[in-house]
Amino acid sequence: MERILITGALGQLGTELVIELQNIYGVNHVIVSDIHQPLHNHFDGVFLTLDVLDKPGLKEVISKYRVTQIYHLAAILSANAEKTPDLAWRINMDGLINILELSREVGIKKVYWPSSIAVFGPDAPKDQTPQHTIMNPNTIYGISKVAGENLCSYYIERYGMDVRSLRYPGLIGHRGLPGGGTTDYAVEIYHEALRNGKFTCPLDKHARLPMMFMPDAVRATLELMEAERSALTVRTSYNLAGISFTPEEITKSIQKSIPYFQTDYQPDFRQKIAASWPNSIDDSAARNDWKWKVAYDLDGMTKEMISHLKVKKQAINVC
Ligand code: NAD
Ligand code: SER
């Protein structure tokens, strides 16, 4: 019987992944943890306050709950990482090495750790960025992700561990709010469209970035984790492609449902980060190895985002 530990589970991705993992493994087989306490009691089952820098604390939890798999999501994302690079490095790197070391020591069966399109820097090809290409990121977040990918690959090669990873594009969902990334605008824009009918975008109107709707990201994660180990050829992290669009294109997509919606543009430091990342991603390795296929396009995602956020807004108004 599997017992799954999730770190950083209160974040944008964890909020969604917990639900699916609980559906698969059962509520009491998923140990939900984060450095913060949940604001509302929105998780059934076990919740623990756990700092990934606290190695003895992690060890105690892994042993007490006889954990068999770890989804290590705790991290500081790109925009916030630029504000506190030393802290971001410690959480992103020391947190990962704590998880890998403890997993090696106790024989954890599988570890999942997310990487990002941020591994690519300004010299990588912008369009259809290949799986294997030059990676010289110029953000502390991207540097920590490249180092993390190599660390995972090292533990696989050296110790025979089963560590799996995806280079997510910007993730867009309606359940959780994003936690300080450069792609956060693509979530905030939907909230502001419904709240105010206008949005001030921190990126340039033509800043094209790879993005993905959360149900696709969660499905990709679970499909990778369920894939036959022998089918996996990428030891660092798989490129994963969803949708690529600009702020101007997402605005037009929203205007199909909310015609009066307007975006104005005030690019800040995040534009420089966005400009160093790919426009689109070649994920043929994922498609070949474990049959990855994206489901949502931009308008399909917009329809779902608006309809879910409308329901949420109505519920808040009733309260
Ligand atoms: P998030 O910022 O929303 O959540 C991260 C969580 O980690 C937060 O709940 C935070 O409280 C927790 N955390 C921070 N420091 C911690 C510590 N010391 N110990 C324990 N928990 C700690 O991020 P997310 O969007 O959920 O991202 C999850 C993972 O996916 C990260 O590795 C991130 O780099 C990766 N990723 C996310 C995106 C995206 O667009 N959201 C894209 C690419 C990769
Ligand atoms: N969406 C993430 C960020 O903007 C990319 O990893 O930081």
Image (tube, rainbow, N blue to C red):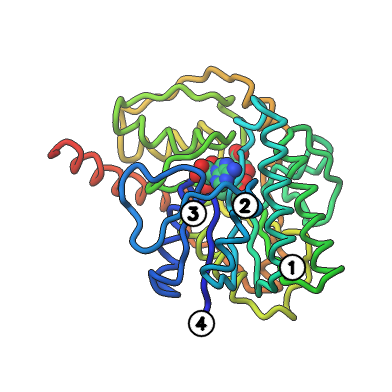
Identify residue for label 2. 168
Is disc 2 in contact with disc 4, using a CB cutoff of under 8 Å?
no
**Residue 20 vs residue 262, the one in the foreground:** 20
Q: In this view, does 3 lie above or below 80?
A: below
Quote the CA–CA distance across marks 1 and 4: 19 Å
- Give the image quarter of residue 23: bottom left
Query: In the image, what residue occupies the spot 43% across and 48% down?
Result: 173
- Whether residue 115 sits left or right of residue 15 in the image: it is right
Identify residue for label 3. 33
Identify residue for label 1. 104
- Whether residue 198 sits left or right of residue 71 in the image: it is left
Quote the CA–CA distance across marks 4 and 3: 20 Å
Is disc 4 in contact with disc 3, using a CB cutoff of under 8 Å?
no
- Whether residue 75 sits left or right of residue 89 in the image: it is left
Closer to the chain start, of discs 3 and 1, is 3
Write down which quadrant ligand 2 falls in: top right
Q: Which amino acid is tagged 4?
A: Met
Closer to the chain start, of discs 4 and 3, is 4
Query: In the image, what residue occupies the spot 83% across and 56% down?
Result: 132
Identify residue for label 4. 1
